[in-house]
Image (cartoon, coloured by chain):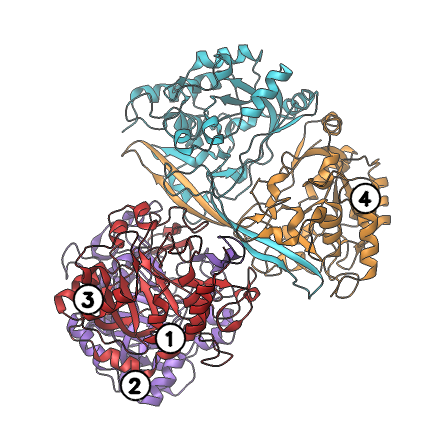
Chain colours: A purple, B red, C orange, D cyan
Amino acid sequence: MALPAEFHEIARQVNNWGRWGADDEIGTLNLVTDSVVRAAAATVRTGRRVPLALPLRRDGLQTGLAAGRIDPQHAMIQLNQELFGPGGVALNDDIVTLGLQAGTHWDALPHVTHTGHLYNGRPATTVTAHAGAAFSGIGTVGALVSRGVLLDVAGARGVPALAPGHAVGPADLDAAAEFGRITLAPGDIALVRTGQMRHALAGDRQAYGFPSPGLSLHTPRWFHTHDVAAVATDTFPFEIVPPEIDGLWLPVHALHLVEMGLLQGQNWNLEELASACAEERRYTFLLTATPEPFTGATGAPVAPVAVL
Amino acid sequence: MALPAEFHEIARQVNNWGRWGADDEIGTLNLVTDSVVRAAAATVRTGRRVPLALPLRRDGLQTGLAAGRIDPQHAMIQLNQELFGPGGVALNDDIVTLGLQAGTHWDALPHVTHTGHLYNGRPATTVTAHAGAAFSGIGTVGALVSRGVLLDVAGARGVPALAPGHAVGPADLDAAAEFGRITLAPGDIALVRTGQMRHALAGDRQAYGFPSPGLSLHTPRWFHTHDVAAVATDTFPFEIVPPEIDGLWLPVHALHLVEMGLLQGQNWNLEELASACAEERRYTFLLTATPEPFTGATGAPVAPVAVL
Amino acid sequence: MALPAEFHEIARQVNNWGRWGADDEIGTLNLVTDSVVRAAAATVRTGRRVPLALPLRRDGLQTGLAAGRIDPQHAMIQLNQELFGPGGVALNDDIVTLGLQAGTHWDALPHVTHTGHLYNGRPATTVTAHAGAAFSGIGTVGALVSRGVLLDVAGARGVPALAPGHAVGPADLDAAAEFGRITLAPGDIALVRTGQMRHALAGDRQAYGFPSPGLSLHTPRWFHTHDVAAVATDTFPFEIVPPEIDGLWLPVHALHLVEMGLLQGQNWNLEELASACAEERRYTFLLTATPEPFTGATGAPVAPVAVL
Amino acid sequence: MALPAEFHEIARQVNNWGRWGADDEIGTLNLVTDSVVRAAAATVRTGRRVPLALPLRRDGLQTGLAAGRIDPQHAMIQLNQELFGPGGVALNDDIVTLGLQAGTHWDALPHVTHTGHLYNGRPATTVTAHAGAAFSGIGTVGALVSRGVLLDVAGARGVPALAPGHAVGPADLDAAAEFGRITLAPGDIALVRTGQMRHALAGDRQAYGFPSPGLSLHTPRWFHTHDVAAVATDTFPFEIVPPEIDGLWLPVHALHLVEMGLLQGQNWNLEELASACAEERRYTFLLTATPEPFTGATGAPVAPVAVL
């Protein structure tokens, strides 16, 4: 369906085009300054590291929900090959084909476009099969390290996981911040936990994928107000699906990526992190989350790590 | 050629099999403890971040030197596709095929085997085309964050880059440590700069690849003595090629990966880091370098970041 | 399970090692002589062409039954790209990743090995990840044109399709030959129709794949006696699965490919051909079935055509 | 550059839009009728088969001339894997990634578009990254068997190969037809030999690719007049490059594919065929050349065979 007035109204409120100059390609990542990173490093107390990426493997998350995305197909091109003669060193080498958004990933800003445009008003046609995204491709992100905050929406509600129909709204985010005694600061990377990942970890990729709880149409304003640099969740579609407004698919994608220039992460495994934060009674940490720098790509795998 | 006595003598000296138990799969990464990471976080002073990965793109480093490795081949499977009807949100999605060791990467321990074995005495036959590496695949690495130290061998010698025939030896490493006023500590990740990357950055992948300066057969003992957790360089082959002993290819690979269980990184871009360290007069930093967790893979891309 | 005495007894009877010399790589394809092809061309009466390949597409036959085989993943690398300036000719170009045995295909002789050997007594170790099959790879087949004969086992029994548990035996093949008034001749390519393809054409890949009717352990002798050059079927596993002898998987593969050096085809769509043969009351035709010549591959897609 | 008046004048003369109905997707392949195929089969005299495809291998034809096209990258996913227990049958299985136009191939009609259209007036936008070509994709070709005619332009001129700057014109084609004593008939598939393939066979892919002799802008009228069904050549770019009119790249592609709906083949190995035709003093034969039916693809590999 065409985008309704409500969408456009929110878009006007959260729009960041021009905020960091007409040439800007990285949007809210501009909020991650050196001082933000210094402060993030200062949050480290125990040195405990929690990896947030799922394994990248053939038996992954894909069910056909996202047409054409494939789980990593790993194959060998050298197998204990004594390339330099018998009795010498033998080599193993491998190759892989994968959908760039198949596993734990960041969407690059041009992952979606609407009304002919991507972030900062650039034409949607600047994405081509030839070169991928000419602007704001995932390779423009560079190093991504900041303070991470776990907004454990499920934990705050005292449930292991939100119901599939649960649209995570501003009140949920406020409650999760209070639950974690988090004071949001500009440049934070918000990790929103719904608990939906439990299905994937239990091997039920169908239940994991759809329907799914997720961010509501009303959360972009919240992230905008708090000047969050990036947002990641533990779900496949990021936002709630089926959507809140019948026929209006992916409005949060459009608001975040196109209007705000805010990086989105999906399929992040936040289960161990939730336990660790609960144990340490602390929901802020140093987060390292640099995407693989595929030039022109509209998304990329990432192996994020929380350091507590 | 078959491995000579000199190789086996060094192997005996640096061997770590059983050091962390018969079931261990991660070798020297065991040295990266929580306290090492706490100390690493404490090195952050400015919050400046330096990305160390090269762009992942079709026009990459491969010249055919490593048979079958291919640079990332990026293609689109959705291009501004209005999947949900005209006027709605349009989607971009992409797919890639790449050699796992094509760009900036970590070798997993089973990347090489010798005399029928890989790290910790496991049979080389536990690597299969079917499942990749059953033990010590790159997916077993988990989170990799530690203190990084830049051993700027070229900088210490006052040259922009080492000559291709230069075998970096223990004396070079000592000089580089002194140059950077580095006191090595167990669990450090050593980044050895030769300056060879300049060829790649200038677009000359032939000159970059071969011949190449690199680590000498005599450096594994040095890393072993210092209990370094991992080593990365700014070259294609990691160690010097052609090799120091005629016909003995990849002995350092075999000593590090098989005998010591020490992770190796290649094609790391250390140029900006060298400048930053020189400017800040400090050659130690927080290093985040978690490989993409491809299950069973014998290597994986990584997007390392130094935080100064 | 280890191969039982019954298997080895049949193996002795059908073995062709050395029959065409110690250097031979193509086995029973040696039976396709110029005169066989002349005779095949002479069978053409109407000029009607029936294609026997299924479409190669993302939504293909794979269910995970054959671990790691993937359906063709098609993506664009140029999309109406005006490479030579605006207003000129625009280019489309594409890339694909696929399992070589994913669709309508030929197995090359090294697709299976047993007891350490492949066809003509060569060591199984001559297949490597490095180079694929050093001997008898699909690229050695060259041009494949001969007389095709449709052995419509289902048609001969008056049923649309055989039951999944039906092991097609020599009596079935005799009945089908009689049904089609076929006199087998050396060099013929036998197409054995079970009707199982109907499931795939109806979109039910699960029912299509497993369990499946297929060739019995007792048919290799029949093909051997008739000096058939190659055999293809309209099923996923070629032979009956689950197998006739509990635990003895793929014995027909081992007899055909390893012992006889007889090319096997799978996932051939014989439905339209069965109708055409019934209409024309003729079950012999010119068959063109040259596999794509992937060097070293252990199988390859083929787009066979029957010319009636 | 924009298409000049001369191009548009020829386009008007050879245009076939609507000739086989508004819904037609296969253009001049409509000329291959049953009677054409009967006649083609009747040309077979010796049964000699000449394969016309190059091997599909990593070390193929690509030099970067066609951006993003890659040679076949073959890898193993099963290697003598005893899937069913020790001592049983062991399996080999493989996977490949390739540019669909990398080797011996047919261009599908939508391989190029101009002025916003492809064959039969359909919008260029009907090709998408999502689904490939919605119309006239290579999968719509179906069975392709007809009479082949070898137009040995180099042979007719008594040279092993044409010079790179040689634009093959109508007079060349007439001379080659006379040289081969060929009377063209509607539905014929013309194979135009320049001898350029000799460079590729000698391992010099640079010399093979560019510059290249090839078809002149003035040949589409010739093929149109003779109602040829398809044309293939032994060169990389098909038509002469650099082009005859400065800046006007790929005009023959645009005339054949878009205006005429005529299938084009490239990288066909016509060397052995030229020898065979010379020996047999006969330049017409049965040609089988069914492309692999990749749904929506704008080209596909083909393994053509001439049967003499």
- Work out how far the residue at label 3 is from the one at label 4, CA to CA, in angstroms: 78 Å
Report the residue marked by disc 4.
C224
| Amino acid type shown at disc 1 | Pro
Secondary structure, mark 3, is helix
**Residue A13: numbered disc:** 3
Viewer-nearest of discs 3 and 1: 1
Specify whether disc 3 shares its chain with disc 2. Answer: yes
Chain of the residue that carries numbered disc 4 in the rendered image: C
Name the disc covering residue A51, or none. 1
The amino acid sitting under disc 3 is: Gln
Q: Can you identify the residue that label 2 sits on?
A: A46
Q: CA distance from mark 3 to mark 2?
A: 40 Å
Q: Earlier in the sequence, mark 3 or mark 1?
A: 3
* Mark 2: secondary structure: loop
Q: How many numbered marks have been drawn onto this rendered protein structure?
A: 4
Q: Is residue C281 above or below residue D83?
A: above
